[in-house]
């Protein structure tokens, strides 16, 4: 489970999402140019990685459904609830500081419960902590994967594959009018299956530096070309971004199986703090953007470039600080509390 390539890809995916969302405060500052749309594919890399890690970690182990759910909840929920609570308090007592959040009891309850619910601000199915929309899919994936643990390990790949294909298939067949049902039957769930299949296919396969590098490069090229392809061919996201994400993850793994990747400290730190960075970057970007509007820097090219650099560095710093001060101590405490189950915990602790 100590794949450095996966760890580094977490860092890359988180930075892609941050840089993608820098466009939002930039637009408020007057920027009207183009922005690399493929950067949103960082989310798709996260989904593929999640499928890979979860399946590989327990593919041949006898893990109870309760134990699996417990470990996933302890890894995902605490930090998400802490940051969500912070936003709820701000929305209740200082709403002028939030641009895209409105205080609504049902919306807040759904946010804590990882359920899709229309935001009162814009009607979109985003929780109060907007990046949490991906966690709604993560939780759905965990729910399905936990059910696959009820059977013997040799049938696990068939069980999880069937469930992850069944929901999107139902969505395509019945085209549900309900936004919630449409969300829960999205084809984006197939991206978790890509990760599962990569783990199943590559676990006993030798590496290939040339083949892996070619697959990785081709995946990156498809990512970069995705906005152009989308203008000419109406592809669903799991094809347009999910397939290249799968190619990038598989290619990186094949390379690492052929050669030993160096242990870089900064990418490791960013990989460790990727979850914290992903959850907090929107808050940091909003704060930096509002502060910049109050300063006499203007909206020229140099000013916007300086803002972009400051916003990126501030987001990374914020993510690392939250990881060091909150997320890492929490996870250490949970691991210490479950030391009797340490082999299982170590296997599935990584996001």
Image (tube, rainbow, N blue to C red):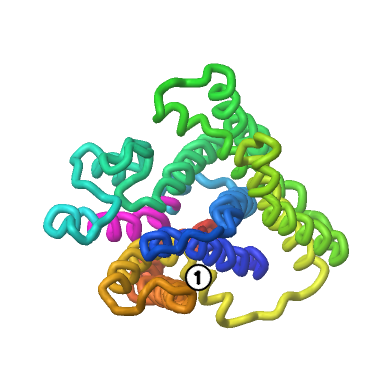
As drawn, is 219 to the left or to the right of 111? Answer: right
Question: Residue 13: in sight, yes or no?
Answer: yes
Q: Quadrant of the N terminus?
A: bottom right
State the count of labels. 1
- Residue 126 or 341: which is nearer the viewer? 126
As drawn, is 198 to the left or to the right of 129? Answer: right
- Res. 78 image quadrant: bottom left
Q: Residues within 10 Å of mark 1 (few under 14, many from 20)?
A: many
Q: Is residue 48 above or below residue 234?
A: below
Was residue 78 drawn as part of the magenta stretch in this picture?
A: yes
Q: Is residue 313 above or below residue 216?
A: below
- Residue 17 or 329: which is nearer the viewer? 17
SS for callout 1 = helix
Give coordinates of residue 102: x percent, y percent.
22, 47
Name the residue beneath numbered marker 1.
272
Identity of the residue drawn at 70% across and 36% down: 233
- Res. 117 image quadrant: top left
Give coordinates of residue 340: x percent, y percent.
44, 62
Q: Is residue 76 above or below residue 327?
A: above
Identity of the residue drawn at 53% across and 33% down: 186
Give coordinates of residue 156: x percent, y percent.
64, 38
Identity of the residue drawn at 61% across and 69% down: 8
Was residue 127 drawn as part of the magenta stretch in this picture?
A: no
Give coordinates of residue 47: x percent, y percent.
56, 50
Identity of the residue drawn at 19% across and 54% down: 91
Residue most extreme to the top: 174
Q: Is residue 311 above or below residue 114?
A: below
Tell me which segment is drawn in magenta. 72-85
């Amino acid at each position: 489970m100590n794949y450095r390539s996966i760890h580094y890809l977490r860092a890359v995916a988180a930075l892609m999402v941050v840089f993608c969302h820098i466009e939002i405060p930039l637009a408020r500052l007057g920027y009207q140019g183009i922005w690399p749309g493929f950067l949103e594919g960082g989310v798709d890399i996260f989904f593929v990685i999640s499928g890979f890690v979860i399946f590989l970690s327990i593919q041949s182990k006898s893990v109870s459904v309760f134990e699996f759910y417990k470990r996933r909840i302890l890894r995902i929920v605490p930090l998400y609830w802490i940051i969500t609570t912070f936003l709820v308090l701000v929305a209740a007592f200082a709403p002028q500081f939030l641009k895209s959040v409105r205080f609504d009891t049902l919306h807040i309850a759904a946010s804590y419960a990882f359920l899709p619910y229309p935001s009162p601000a814009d009607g979109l199915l985003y929780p109060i902590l907007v990046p949490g929309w991906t966690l709604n899919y993560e939780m759905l994936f965990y729910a399905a994967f936990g059910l696959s643990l009820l059977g013997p390990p040799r049938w696990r790949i068939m069980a999880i594959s069937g469930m992850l294909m069944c929901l999107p298939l139902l969505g395509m067949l019945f085209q549900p009018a309900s936004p919630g049902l449409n969300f829960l039957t999205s084809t984006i769930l197939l991206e978790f299956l890509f990760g599962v299949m990569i783990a199943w296919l590559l676990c006993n396969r030798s590496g290939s530096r040339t083949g892996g590098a070619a697959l990785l490069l081709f995946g990156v090229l498809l990512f970069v070309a995705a906005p152009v392809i989308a203008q000419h061919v109406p592809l669903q996201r799991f094809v347009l971004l999910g397939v290249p994400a799968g190619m990038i993850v598989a290619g990186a793994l094949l390379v690492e199986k052929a050669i030993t990747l160096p242990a870089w400290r900064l990418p490791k730190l960013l990989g460790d703090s990727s979850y914290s960075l992903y959850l907090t970057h929107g808050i940091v970007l909003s704060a930096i953007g509002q502060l910049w509007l109050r300063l006499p820097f203007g909206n020229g090219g140099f000013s916007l470039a300086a803002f972009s650099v400051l916003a990126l560095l501030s987001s990374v710093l914020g993510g690392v600080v939250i990881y060091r001060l909150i997320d890492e101590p929490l996870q250490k405490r949970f691991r210490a509390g479950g030391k009797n189950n340490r082999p299982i915990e170590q296997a599935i602790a990584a996001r």
